[in-house]
């Protein structure tokens, strides 16, 4: 049988998982190029359906372009607030991005010509998006291990970002990532601290055999 990591290695993996945060508050300053390269390589080693590797990552180094992306996000932030109705004011108090303060901005997109990839996508074409999400999660966990904050911004108009970055037809931006130094990581998810939402109990999300049938905790005997 394959051997597990040793205790310290396992603890480090779980620590990165539990202490990862969607960061919005950054300390200005550059990200070490070698560290950024490690993060990109971690993303590129994510699993992908049919090994299609559908992620494409655009590093934003032009200050004017970063400001244009910020404007796109701001327009959608206001539109989202309007769409939330009664929670408008509550939403407007939240900090939803750190585009102007973070050291690096990366736009992660789905590649074009995805329709040619059938393996694993014939009935679930959205598995390409799941693959990109795995790449982003790899980068997120690696960032936490490197002591860097990362925030996933999804509040933007897809066509506006596509046009700004001259993406080909068929390509689709799915994330603007803010990466950089932070004073400290949030002790709990920010939206939980701000009382926007609470983490569900694990048992509420795990079923056994059929939808809605509660699953016993692993190791416990099922009830008769």
Image (cartoon, rainbow, N blue to C red):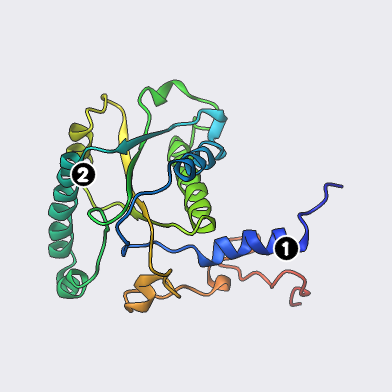
- Which residue is at 35% across, 25% downward? 112
Q: Which residue in the structure is indicated by mark 2?
A: 66
In three-dimensional space, the C-alpha distance between marks 2 and 1, rounded to whole angstroms, equals 40 Å
In this rendering, the answer to whether 224 lies above or below 133 is below
Classify 10 Å Cα crowding around label 2: few (below 14), some (14-19), many (20 and above). Answer: some
Classify 10 Å Cα crowding around label 1: few (below 14), some (14-19), many (20 and above). Answer: few
- Which residue is at 77% across, 71% downward? 219
Where in the figure is residue 194, as x and y percent of width and height?
A: 32, 77
Q: How many marks?
A: 2
**Quadrant in which residue 21 is drawn:** bottom left
Where in the figure is residue 2, as x and y percent of width and height?
A: 83, 47
Which mark is drawn over residue 46?
none
In the displayed structure, does residue 104 sit left or right of residue 156? Answer: right
Q: Residue furthest right?
A: 1
Q: Which comes before the other along the chain, label 2 or label 1?
A: 1
Question: What element does badge 2 sit on?
Answer: helix
Front-most of residues 75 and 44: 44
In this rendering, the answer to whether 220 lies above or below 38 is below
Where in the figure is residue 51, as x and y percent of width and height?
A: 56, 29
In the displayed structure, does residue 85 sit left or right of residue 112? Answer: left
Can the viewer see residue 132 in this picture?
A: yes
Q: Which residue in the structure is indicated by mark 1?
A: 8
Question: What element does badge 1 sit on?
Answer: helix
Where in the figure is residue 49, as x and y percent of width and height?
A: 54, 34
In the displayed structure, does residue 27 sit left or right of residue 148? Answer: left
Where the C terminus falls, by quadrant? bottom right
In this rendering, the answer to whether 161 lies above or below 196 is above
């Amino acid at each position: 049988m394959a051997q597990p990591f040793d205790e310290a290695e396992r603890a480090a993996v779980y620590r990165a998982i539990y202490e990862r945060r969607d960061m919005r508050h950054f300390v200005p300053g550059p990200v070490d190029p070698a560290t950024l390269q490690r993060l990109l390589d971690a993303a590129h080693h994510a699993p992908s359906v049919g090994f299609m590797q559908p992620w494409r990552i655009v590093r934003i180094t032009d200050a004017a372009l970063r400001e244009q992306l910020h404007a796109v996000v701001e327009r959608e932030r206001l539109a989202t607030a309007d769409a939330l109705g009664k929670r408008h004011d509550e939403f407007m108090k939240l900090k939803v991005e750190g585009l102007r303060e973070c050291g690096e901005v990366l736009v992660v997109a789905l590649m074009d010509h995805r329709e040619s990839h059938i393996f694993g996508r014939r009935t679930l074409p959205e598995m390409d998006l799941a693959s990109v999400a795995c790449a982003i999660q790899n980068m997120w966990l690696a960032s936490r291990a490197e002591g860097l904050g990362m925030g996933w911004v999804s509040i933007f108009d897809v066509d506006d970002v596509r046009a700004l970055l001259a993406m080909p037809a068929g390509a689709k931006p799915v994330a603007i990532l803010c990466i950089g130094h932070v004073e400290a990581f949030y002790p709990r998810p920010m939206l939980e601290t701000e009382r926007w939402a609470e983490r569900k109990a694990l048992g509420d999300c795990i079923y056994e055999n059929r939808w809605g049938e509660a699953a016993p905790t692993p190791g416990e005997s099922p009830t008769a």
